[in-house]
Amino acid sequence: MSILTWTWIIVGLSFMLYIGIAIWARAKTTGDFYVAAKQIHPVMNGMATGADWMSAASFISMAGLISFMGRDGAMYLMGWTGGYVLLAMLLAPYLRKYGKFTVPMFVGERYYSQTARVIAVICAIFVSFTYVAGQMRGVGVVFSRFLEVDINTGVIIGMAIVFLYAVMGGMKGITYTQVAQYCVLIMAYMIPAIFVSIMLTNNPIPQLGYGSTLSENGMKLLGTDGGYLLSKLDVIQKDLGFPAYTGRGAKSMIDVFAITFALMVGTAGLPHIIIRFFTTPTIKGARASAGWALFFIAILYTAAPAVASFARLNLVKTVHNQSYTEAPSWFKNWEKTGLVAWKDKNGDGKMQLAKGNAFKGKVAFDKTTTGQYGEKVVTTPIDDKSTNELYVDNDIIVLASPEIAKLPAWVVALVAAGGLAAALSTAAGLLLVIASAFSHDLLKSIIIKDATEKQELLWARFAAGGAVIVAGYFGINPPGFVAQVVAFAFGLAASSFFPVIVLGIFWKRATKEGAMSGMLSGIAFTAAYIIYFKFINPSANVAANWWFGISPEGIGTIGMLINFAVMIVVSKLTPEPPAEVQRMVESLRYPREIA
Amino acid sequence: MSQKRDLKEYWKRNLRYVAILLAIWFAVSYGAGIMFADALDSIKLAGFPLGFWFANQGSEIIFVLLIVVYVKLMNNLDHEFDVHEK
């Protein structure tokens, strides 16, 4: 059977499973809808959180990024896992003890201020929409390559599925679907990794395989002599003019430090992750959930660097110095999607990889003609500073690696289903945050205060439905700045929510004036820095112009420090919070109610 | 009154646990994985340069273990001070 048939079968089955779960887990109350009635077992919650967290970026893009960045790429691995330690120890148990539905609600009550709550709502909605747009693009990419439908049709199918289970099931439907999606995505990630690991090193555990020596078969496939896989990769990289794969990369240490920190703190400040810890039955369960979540995430995250180095080896060996006419079929398949491109700079008919960019700017094609060898003609000007002839988008590394390694068609199909599971599960979690921020924090508490539970539930469903449509719109008409705004989402979460929630829990003296001025100055600083370098003056976005050598991706770290500093100073200068708020903060510290 | 002193002690112990665990959290990722990675790379663990390994896998594995230890410590502490959920 062909890849296409297999993909329709596997993706179809997985979608049927999600819909079945959605029908079974319909939400009946607002408690069901917002926090799954707080009845989710910690192991299940851990899996669901894992799927919620691992987005199209983790599943599709991350290994590709690492494969191009070498050791610098590890900042994503550490940054997107380290936040769970902060969540487990500084946030989850206390927010669970607080026991309500949303993050803005906590901010509003802790800081005895509706204004603070509204600021938090706006941040939550902005951060979540930014993220959703990226997921929908991921859905589109998978559909267009593997199911050979139009990207827009792909996005609409994805929207319809999410709509069904997010609107019907709320948090309850989403959580159980995410458990299934975790299983699909982890199998889809691990099976090809295991295959390739055995192929190259005879070690069935990819996490260890990439630190092993090449097997006979691996040497034959790569056409090299024996030795450790990573040392071979270092040599190959250096031969092509790249820095050693395992050594220091292009980024400065302070920037790697700041980006890692912003990602960790940003993770701990993302509303769709925090909200997961409201769904466990007990405080003990909330602590354990964070551990289970990180355990399930770490399975994929420790395999990602293995996938990255296998893919890098296979990529270099299958395309570098190959003539285009004999290019492997995966190359031509992906060329159709515009995610790989080749321009014969030196006119030898062969594809050469080298340091630097093949083209100046975003790759575009002339749709009417093909080149001398049948390749697609790139209209983007070439970058003549580099002899590199190949553009390979980071996003295809994971999706194409089973094809590159010539694995069976069903494995390729499984990866497609996994990519969809990762994107859809994250999208659903985000949509729920948007829906609850809208219906619970804006409508119910500020606009229609006397809404009944039934009305509120209806509004929550409407809000989720509306959010799906907006997200779909962004998927079909992706704003050119999706990649840029991801830095924004993390920077904003790091510089707004994290300090306010942590001080809100650990420092009774934190006042509403402190919280509001801290949040606003943290966001204003971070947003101004990112907007300046990403949108107003992108040509100035080089290390020499950055403050302290920190790139816009890492500036959330400084924004967070500013937020903490402002909040502490202003809180000291303003009257202390009312006694009942201080009592509430005190009570968060003890799992049991103390009289 | 003694219960109040107990609660203070409970909170202090909690903060101490968190401080120690977060110090390890910082040391393995920012220390071994970033600041001292180059120096550690001269040591090899099978095919892995050690600094590279900490950044790619070591930190993540230790993060999971840190949470496991935290959960155990806190559950015991809750019982010791009789503030656990019933």
Image (cartoon, rainbow, N blue to C red):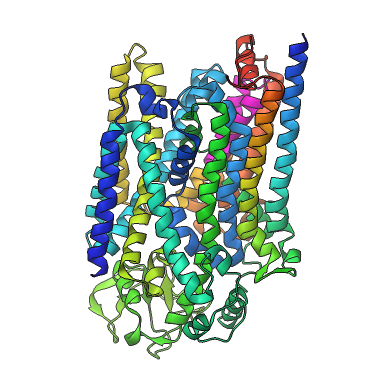
Residue A519 makes an appearance in the image: no
Q: Which quarter of the rendered picture does the C terminus of chain A lie within?
A: top right
Near-viewer residue (A574 or B77): B77
> Which picture quadrant has residue A19?
top left
Magenta segment range?
Answer: A491-518
Asked if residue A499 lies in the magenta stretch, the reply is yes
- x 28%, y 57%: residue: A10
Tally the numbered discs: 0
Q: Is residue A581 left or right of residue A328?
A: right
Asked if residue B57 lies in the magenta stretch, the reply is no
Where is residue A186 drawn, in percent x and y? Answer: 43, 54
The image shows residue A252, relative to residue A26, as above or below, that is: below
The image shows residue A447, relative to residue A305, as above or below, that is: above
Q: Which quarter of the rendered picture does the N terminus of chain A lie within?
A: bottom left
> Which picture quadrant has residue A561?
top right
Where is residue A461 drawn, in percent x and y? Answer: 29, 29
**What secondary structure predominates along the stretch shown in magenta?**
helix
The image shows residue B23, relative to residue A514, as above or below, that is: below
Near-viewer residue (A126 or A310): A310
- x 40%, y 91%: residue: A348
Near-viewer residue (A261 or A474): A261
Where is residue A505 drawn, in percent x and y? Answer: 63, 25
- x 35%, y 75%: residue: A331
Q: Which residue sits furthest bottom?
A: A348
Q: Is residue B24 left or right of residue A193?
A: right
Where is residue A182 drawn, in percent x and y? Answer: 41, 48
> Which picture quadrant has residue A143?
bottom left
Residue B5 makes an appearance in the image: yes
Q: Is residue A408 left or right of residue A131?
A: left
Near-viewer residue (A352 or A559): A352
